[in-house]
């Protein structure tokens, strides 16, 4: 079965089942990358002279909106430049995969967290609207208070 056929099968599923399958694909980085590579290869075979960048832009990968709430934005602005760059990179990565390797579900409150060195990003995921709400960003010693 080709990657395009897999995508067609996923689109034909009921919404709840489709969401579970997509969540599984997005949570397994190796599987996700294999699927992307297969889609890219198929698109590239159809038009080998087409620039690779155009092929990538034409692929329809699942994308999420990332909304950084005002308190988190303020906390981000107060961080050292190097840390801010690493956290910005992690926030951009959440657009492609809101459940990256290492994500942990929070026990004391609703949501998840990802680790960026000694810093944490706390967020909630709205699966229906496909939005990641970033609520807090801070050092691990302060973030859970």
Image (spheres, helix red, strand yellow):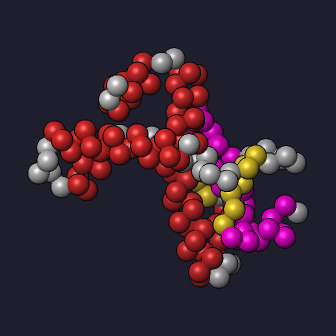
Please identify the residue farthest to the left as the structure is shown: 49
**In which quadrant of the rendered image does the N terminus lie?**
top left
Q: In the image, is residue 32 above or below residue 21?
A: below
Q: Is residue 134 magenta?
A: yes
The residue under the point 72% across, 69% down is 119
The residue under the point 63% across, 76% down is 83
In which image quadrant can residue 80 be found?
bottom right
Q: Is residue 42 magenta?
A: no
The answer to whether residue 45 of the structure is visible from this angle is yes
Q: In the image, is residue 115 above or below residue 130?
A: below
**Number of numbered tags placed on the structure image:** 0
Q: Position of residue 142 (x, y in %)?
A: 84, 69
Pick whichever, 103 or 28, lies toward us. Answer: 28
Q: In the visual, does 118 lie left or right of 48?
A: right
Pick whichever, 60 or 49, lies toward us. Answer: 49
The answer to whether residue 63 of the structure is visible from this angle is no
Q: Position of residue 28 (x, y in %)?
A: 56, 42
Q: In the visual, does 58 lie left or right of 134?
A: left
The residue under the point 32% across, 29% down is 2
In which image quadrant can residue 144 be found?
bottom right
The residue under the point 59% across, 80% down is 82
Pick whichever, 56 or 143, lies toward us. Answer: 56
Q: Position of residue 108 (x, y in %)?
A: 87, 48
Pick whichever, 37 or 90, lies toward us. Answer: 37
**In which quadrant of the rendered image does the C terminus lie?**
bottom right
Q: Which portion, as a residue range, is magenta?
A: 117-144
Q: Main secondary structure of the magenta part?
A: strand
Q: Position of residue 130 (x, y in %)?
A: 55, 39
């Amino acid at each position: 079965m080709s990657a395009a056929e897999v995508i067609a099968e996923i689109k034909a599923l009921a919404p709840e089942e489709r969401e579970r399958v997509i969540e599984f694909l997005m949570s397994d980085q190796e599987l996700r990358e294999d699927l992307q590579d297969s889609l890219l290869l198929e698109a590239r075979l159809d038009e080998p002279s087409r620039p690779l960048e155009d092929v990538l832009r034409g692929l329809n990968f699942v994308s999420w909106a990332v909304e950084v709430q005002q308190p988190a934005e303020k906390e981000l602005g107060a961080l050292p430049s190097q840390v801010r760059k690493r956290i910005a990179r992690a926030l951009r990565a959440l657009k492609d995969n809101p459940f990256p390797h290492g994500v942990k579900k929070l026990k004391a409150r609703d949501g998840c967290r990802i680790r960026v060195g000694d810093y944490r990003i706390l967020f909630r995921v709205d699966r229906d609207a496909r939005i990641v709400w970033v609520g807090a960003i801070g050092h691990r010693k302060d973030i859970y208070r």
